[in-house]
Image: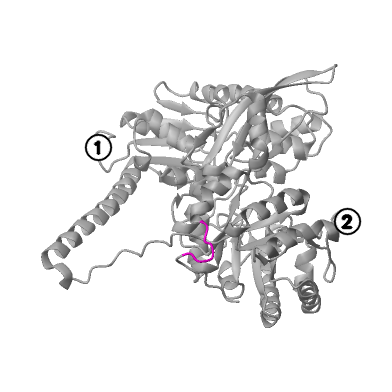
Amino acid sequence: MSPRAPNRVAAVLWDMDGTLVDTEPYWIECEYELVGEFGGTWSEEHAHAIVGFDLRDSARYIREHGGVDLPIDDIVNRLLDGVIARVRRSVPWRPGARELLADLRRARVPCALVTMSWRRFADAVVDALPPGSFTHVVSGDEVTHGKPHPEPYLAAARGLGVPARRCVAIEDSPTGTRSAVAAGCVVYAIPNVVEVPAGPRYTRLSSLHLLDLRTMNEAVAARGRRRGRRIATGAVLLLAAVVIGVALAWPQPAPPPPPDIPIDAWAPYWVLPAATASVEAHGELLREVSPFWYSAQGATEIGRPSTLTADAMLPLLDAVQSHDIRVVPSIVDGMPAGGMAAVLSDPATRTQHVQAIVSLAQRNDYDGIDLDYEQFAFADGRDTWAATRPNWVAFLAELAAALHADGRTLTVTVPPIYDTERTAESGYWVYDYAAMGTIVDRIRIMAYDYNVSEPGPIAPLDWMTTAIRAAKRAVDDDDKLVLGVGLYGRNWPVSTSGSCPATAEGVVPVTQSSIDALVAKRGVVPVHDPVVGESTFTYQLEISDGTRTCTQTREVHMIDAEGARARVDLARRERLGGASLWALGFDSEATWTAIAALARVPGSSTTTTTTE
């Protein structure tokens, strides 16, 4: 049997650490040694948090949490040296790994190793196997985007010359499993150091001993049969429709999406003059503006930065009102971790907080309020979510009733979910999308910051689509959903040679309004990726203080004007109730030109449905 035969396994793609070999204890030993050398502290919790990570991501985490004062690549190489030395003494094969590899080799099924470890470590493991065990190797230092991005597995399938949908991937971590699933492989997750929760798009097994070539072939064949049935069913139905014409009750295609979509935007206080200028120049394209300058400091205390005076606020408010734009200011959770959760858990303090918010809206005659309470997701522990979730819903119900009674609206800005479950793969389920959809007027989805700890996309379009469709499954009314659209990027140091001064910059934010100056200064040409919907470029930066000198290779990822348009158009095609720009003051003229034809303005062919 040829491994390339239809509906049979074309190739098997193996993760290495924890799947093929159990080197995780080696890595953890080396992490403890390195952190201890620099006088830091380490823990099993820290060690398990980075299982499956790209090595540079792990190094950043170790530098931040373990106090290891070394360049990223130096940390990686120190760890690699220690682990490779241990592997050369003894290769800790996972039970059943060599036996399954031997069976696949005898059946002439090609295998690839897909690891986020670097090539020199992968080579040390491959060298310990019989020749021909692996036809291709993809390592972490050879890909642009590490796991959980699909690139590593797509690169492996491409390197073997086979379609990813006919490849079987074997993983042990949630991060790697997401990568393989996103690439379209048939995926088996065999947990080792960290648990992999159950999921509908992969199969969990307790041991490699439970996996053989027949099982893999059956899984790939079943996928092929499902695909074939879909095609065949479509063909039969189409033929029947042709034969009996209009007499057949044939499902009609969905109506086309509206030609335009409402545009909202946040206006941060730290770029207020630029945000005001954007409203003055392009206010006719905006439905709502959310001044981003309030912070909840307690149940009854809602303040703004001391540097933000009333006089500084007036130009933006005047510009907004002159264009008849609704004013819906944002309030962020400025309390310490657990603070807001505690306020909402007590009915008395919850009511006090509702009254403080309503009073703010009444005093300033705002059209509504936007809540951007992110501490639940990013500061409070995941173990608090089950308790916070119903308290958050109860709070919103009380607040919405009070605002609606006063003719005002309630919007919430929340991180994304990826399904409607409550697993580790479900996203930020502390925010109950389904319940929120029955209470609030709009749910703004923060569909950005996909990468915050590594160089990579800000908000890949496929990831945004996943978040949108999960929200649509949870919320009955698509018109209540608003897609958050970033107008920014990040400038990352990805490698360093020499010894940098203490003043050397780390990750630097960039915006559409600032990127042109950087491009001109460095003489680079950004490359736009239409699949991701972003532009990237790299350049060299020499840094010196007269004593120490280094050269950084820096990598910029940016949502450009073309990317902003693609995201607004995605929201339109998904029939959402709007797109909200983060943020005014970050924008460029090119973005307004790009989105103008999509923006719903007074007198357009469609109108917005609200619950006001």
Q: Is residue 41 something one can see in this rendering?
A: yes
**The disc label shown at residue 572, or none:** none
Query: In the shown orientation, is residue 306 left or right of residue 556?
Result: right
Residue 262 placement (x, y as % from top left): 54, 62
Q: Which residues are magenta?
A: 599-604
- What residue occupies the far right of the structure in this picture? 306
| Tag count | 2
Q: Nearer the viewer, mark 1 or mark 2?
A: 2
Residue type at the position of mark 2: Ser
Comparing 12 with 427, the one in front is: 427
Q: Is residue 83 visible?
A: no
User: At 64% across and 22% down in the image, what residue appears?
Assistant: 85
**The quarter of the displayed image where residue 103 is located:** top left
Quadrant (top left/top right/bottom left/bottom right) for the N terminus = top left
Amino acid type, mark 1: Ala
The label number, if any, that marks residue 306 in the structure image: 2
Magenta segment includes 601: yes
Residue 5's disc is: 1
Residue at horizontal 68 percent and vertical 63 percent from the top: 322
Q: Nearer the viewer, residue 345 or 261?
A: 261
Q: Position of residue 125 (x, y in %)?
A: 52, 25
Within the image, what quadrant is residue 302 found in?
bottom right
**Dominant SS in magenta:** loop
State yes or no: residue 367 in magenta: no
Q: Residues within 10 Å of mark 1 (few under 14, many from 20)?
A: few
Q: With 120 as the anchor, is 188 left or right in this view?
A: left
